Every structure is written in C-alpha cells, then in structure tokens.
C-alpha cells in the first residue's frame, strides 16, 4: 500500500483534480471508471465543481456507487444519493443506468443484499474476487468513523460480506455500509477531510490508531490518499 498525505489550501480544486485524473487513467486502462462517492457536507462542493469544470468527461464510461447510505427514501434531505443527484448527476446528465443507488427505502437487510449482489455481478464479469473501485472516496467523522463504520461496531469485524446493515449514533441510526474488505479492495482510496477542528482525529487516524475505523482502511494492493484542507 502506498500512502500519501496532502495538506492543501485549495481543497476543492485538488479533490476535483484527483477524481478527474483517476477517471482518465481508469478509462484509458480498462475502458471504465468505477467511482465510489461518499456523503456528508465535505464532498458537496467537490461534486459541484467537478460537474462545472468537466462537463466533457465521458460520463457514459463512469459507474458510480455509494460507500454508505442512510435508510431513507431517495428524495429525503439526509439521502447521500439526493445530495449527489443535486450537485453532480443532474448537472451533467449522468446516465441513469450507471448510477448504482442503495435503496434506503426498503428493509435494510434486503437493501444490503441487493447492493452486494449487484456489485458481485460486475466483479464476476471482471474476474474479481471483490468489486474493485478505481477510486473510492471516504469521509472522516469526529469519532474516527468512515462510511457507516463506527467505533466499536460489529461491522468492523466483518470479513465475508461486502455490504451490510449498520447502526450509527446519530439519526437516522439505520444505515447500509460497505465493509472493510470491500473498501480495501479498491485500487485507490481517498479520504476527503476539510475541517481544521478534526486535526487531532486526523493525526490519530493517519498514524495508525486502529481503535478508529478510518485507520483500518488499508488498500490491499492499491493507494491511499489523505486530502486534508488547511
């Protein structure tokens, strides 16, 4: 695993550049860019700027997934999907068939299994043990959580499943999340952290304190980037 830590005062622009470069690299190498979005407020301006700057990207060759989702309908204000649709998908006329949405409005167990099977079908076509994202974006919570993997959660010990239901400490508590084995199968994982108040938790996570879920993100044969706003 190759790790780099980038501290920047041009956070949004640097995040967009990472995504753009990863897209072109993957499409040139494999004809498709498999891109996992994260939720929350931090990526919102990143997605909006990506849409603004790169309307000419070959969106038909980009396949989007979500690393986690709250168990709410897709038009709910707390839906990660809704945020991505408002900032990115609608702005670039993104092909609907290329958006793999987690159906947060159905039973959590059913939603997790459905999503897991969808990713497994694609992985099988590529001859992969697990779906291998070209770029997987993650955020960092104040408690060191990432995706919907929270400190002390049984989800952290999952080794077989790729997508599972999980419980978070904030409403809505019920979530669907990628597991560490799926996250760590990515070719490139990039944390987006743009909050100076998180400096202590960033230091603990980047120094390998495995009491924090984020510190357990270690791509098996890929790259790990921490993009940290100043």
Image (cartoon, rainbow, N blue to C red):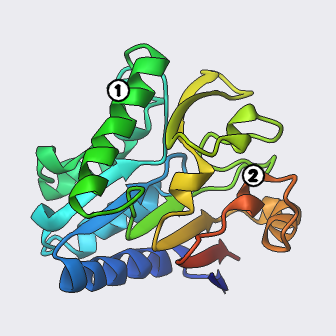
- The residue depicted at 65 percent of the width and 73 percent of the height is 229
Q: Which residue is more in the foreground, 230 or 111?
A: 111
Dot 1: within a 10 Å radius of its alpha carbon, few (fewer than 14), some, or many (20 or more) residues?
many
Residue at the location (51% across, 53% down)? 182
Can you give x and y, in whole percent of width and height, for residue 2 in the image? Answer: 62, 86
Q: Secondary structure at mark 1?
A: loop
- Residue 161: x %, y % from top left: 53, 39
Q: Residues within 10 Å of mark 2 (few under 14, many from 20)?
A: many
Q: Is residue 134 left or right of residue 202?
A: left
Among the two numbered marks 2 and 1 on one chain, the one whose residue lies closer to the N terminus = 1
Q: Residue furthest top?
A: 107
Q: Quadrant of residue 173?
A: top right
User: Helix, strand, or loop for circle 2?
Assistant: helix
Quadrant of the rendering where the N terminus is positioned = bottom right
Q: Is residue 54 above or below residue 46?
A: below
Which quadrant of the figure has residue 181? bottom right
Q: Position of residue 112 (x, y in %)?
A: 44, 29
Q: Is residue 165 above or below residue 216?
A: above
How many marks overall?
Answer: 2
Residue 81 position, x and y percent, is 36, 39
Kindly identify which residue carries mark 2.
213
Residue at the (19%, 54%) spot, across then down: 91
Position of residue 4 in the picture relative to residue 94 (left or right): right
As drawn, 153 above or below 212: above
Q: Is residue 101 visible?
A: no
* Residue contact between numbered discs 2 and 1, judged by CB atoms under 8 Å: no
| Residue beneath disc 1 | 103
Is the C terminus in the top left, top right, bottom left or bottom right quadrant? bottom right
C-alpha gap between disc 2 and disc 1: 24 Å
């Amino acid at each position: 695993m190759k790790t780099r830590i980038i501290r920047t005062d041009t956070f949004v622009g640097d995040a967009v550049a990472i995504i753009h470069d990863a897209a072109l690299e993957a499409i040139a190498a494999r004809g498709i860019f498999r891109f996992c979005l994260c939720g929350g407020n931090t990526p919102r301006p990143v997605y909006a700027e990506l849409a603004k700057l790169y309307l000419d990207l070959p969106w038909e060759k980009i396949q989007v997934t979500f690393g986690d989702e709250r168990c709410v309908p897709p038009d709910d204000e707390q839906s990660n999907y809704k945020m991505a649709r408002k900032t990115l998908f609608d702005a670039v006329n993104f092909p609907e068939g290329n958006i793999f949405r987690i159906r947060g409005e159905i039973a959590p167990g059913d939603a997790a299994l459905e999503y897991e099977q969808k990713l497994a079908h694609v992985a099988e076509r590529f001859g992969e043990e697990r779906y291998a994202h070209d770029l997987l974006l993650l955020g960092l919570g104040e408690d060191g959580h990432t995706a919907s993997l929270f400190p002390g959660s049984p989800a952290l010990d999952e080794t077989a499943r790729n997508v599972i239901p999980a419980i978070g400490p904030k409403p809505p508590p019920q979530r669907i999340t990628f597991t560490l084995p799926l996250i760590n199968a990515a070719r490139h994982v990039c944390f987006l952290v743009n909050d100076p108040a998180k400096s202590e938790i960033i230091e603990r996570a980047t120094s390998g304190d495995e009491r924090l879920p984020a510190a357990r993100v270690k791509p098996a044969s890929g790259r790990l980037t921490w993009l940290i706003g100043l």
